[in-house]
Image (cartoon, rainbow, N blue to C red):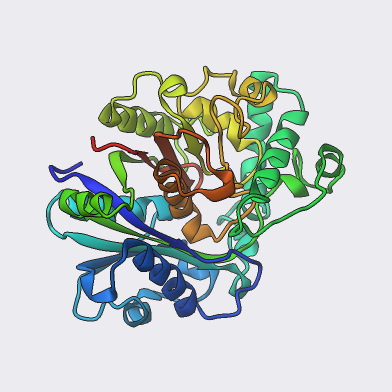
Amino acid sequence: MGSERVAVVGIGQTKHQATADCSIAGLVRQAAQRALDDAQMTWSDIDAVVIGKAPDFFEGVMMPELYLADALGATGKPMFRVHTAGSVGGSTAIVAQDLVAAGIHERVLTVAFEKQSESEAMWALSVAMPFQPPMHAGAGGYFAPHIRAYIRRSGAPDHIGILVALKDRLNALKNPYAHLHEEGITFESVKDSIMLWDPIRYSETCPSSDGACAMVLTNEKGGDAAAADGRKPAWVRGTAFRSEPTMFAGRDQVNPRGGQECAADVYRQAGIVDPRRDVDVVEMYVPFSWFEPMWLENLGFAAEGEGWKLVEDGVTQMDGDLPVNCSGGVLSSNPIGASGMLRFAEAALQVRGQAGEHQVDGARTAVGHAYGGGSQFFAMWVVGDEKP
């Protein structure tokens, strides 16, 4: 964090869906325009643009920022591209935040996107490593053994993943931007859905989505001006990144050290001593249902081996004392490059009181979380309704 306070004063997102009826440029333009409208700014008010997306080979369009500069009004302005695999949406927001916090720019537009309908992410992630037999297909094939290891270590019962999936899909019904709106979903329908990568069922898996998210970040002067105008800002209280290699001897892929250290750092900056007590709502990156109990432990909301008990006890429900993924989360909308930024933006919406039907009453402190690669890139921020 730099010396300048940073406020989120504009948030925009597209309707996330299987096939967007517009180009990539159209997607990012739509989200950015909505963020500018929310901030009551125009393109000329923006000093710099920070854009992020997942690997270019997902869509086969290399370096899309080259032509998106025009769509995002960045001609003649600084523009930066960020890439940290699936966590990129969070990392992109943090880079934008840092430019304001350091006093380099006053108003920064940050955008993240993915258009999965023009790609095949599952098979893009299924390339065999040299000299090794093909062991998995897609991200689910890679992460399923980690989930199985978590179940073995924690003794969690099989229905925990089902409870998470059911919760998030029901929450998504309250979010008009969510990709999946599954009216009539039940515990039994999730349980009976086809097993894709044991123990991950079809209904415990994120969808493939087209979508984009954007935010306008500004300094203390801009945040105060928005507040004086009756437009409540979300104040950034802390940000953190951490990385680690995909493979090394002794690596714990169930409870990665990088995630633990990222959480500890952001809580320290935000003055959070007891995350379970001090945080009102969490948007965490859960592409497969079992990652909710795993990340509850990794991020310090539960002791190791105890995260699944919070799920079973209803703690993470909308009316629980630690609501998680009230927007429906990644399990309901997954434009990969934008999914991390959506977690950050949804946290900001909660403390601004603008989350609509999935608003948590009285939310004042919220955590946004993203992870990517082989659980090796982590990005988090804490936002609040009061100036830090």
Out of 37 and 112, give the one closest to the viewer.
37
Name which residue lies at 27% across and 55% down.
Answer: 229
Please, is residue 102 above or below residue 18 in the view? above
- Where on the picture, by quarter, is residue 351? top left
Query: Would you say 322 lies left or right of 136 here?
Result: left
- Where on the picture, by quarter, is residue 143? top right
Please, is residue 255 above or below residue 238 in the view? above
Please, is residue 23 above or below residue 257 in the view? below
Name which residue lies at 23% across and 69% down.
Answer: 46
Q: Which quadrant of the rendered structure holds the N terminus?
A: top left
Q: Position of residue 232 (x, y in %)?
A: 33, 48
Q: Position of residue 301 (x, y in %)?
A: 49, 24
Q: Position of residue 341 (x, y in %)?
A: 43, 53
- Residue 254 showing in the rendered view: no
Query: Would you say 178 lies left or right of 24 here?
Result: right
Q: Position of residue 241 (x, y in %)?
A: 33, 42
Name which residue lies at 67% across and 21% down.
Answer: 313
Count how many numbered circles sit on residues in the image: 0
Q: Which quadrant of the rendered structure holds the C terminus?
A: top left
- Residue 335 showing in the rendered view: yes
Out of 223 and 188, give the one closest to the viewer.
223
Out of 57 and 27, give the one closest to the viewer.
27
Name which residue lies at 35% across and 27% down.
Answer: 264
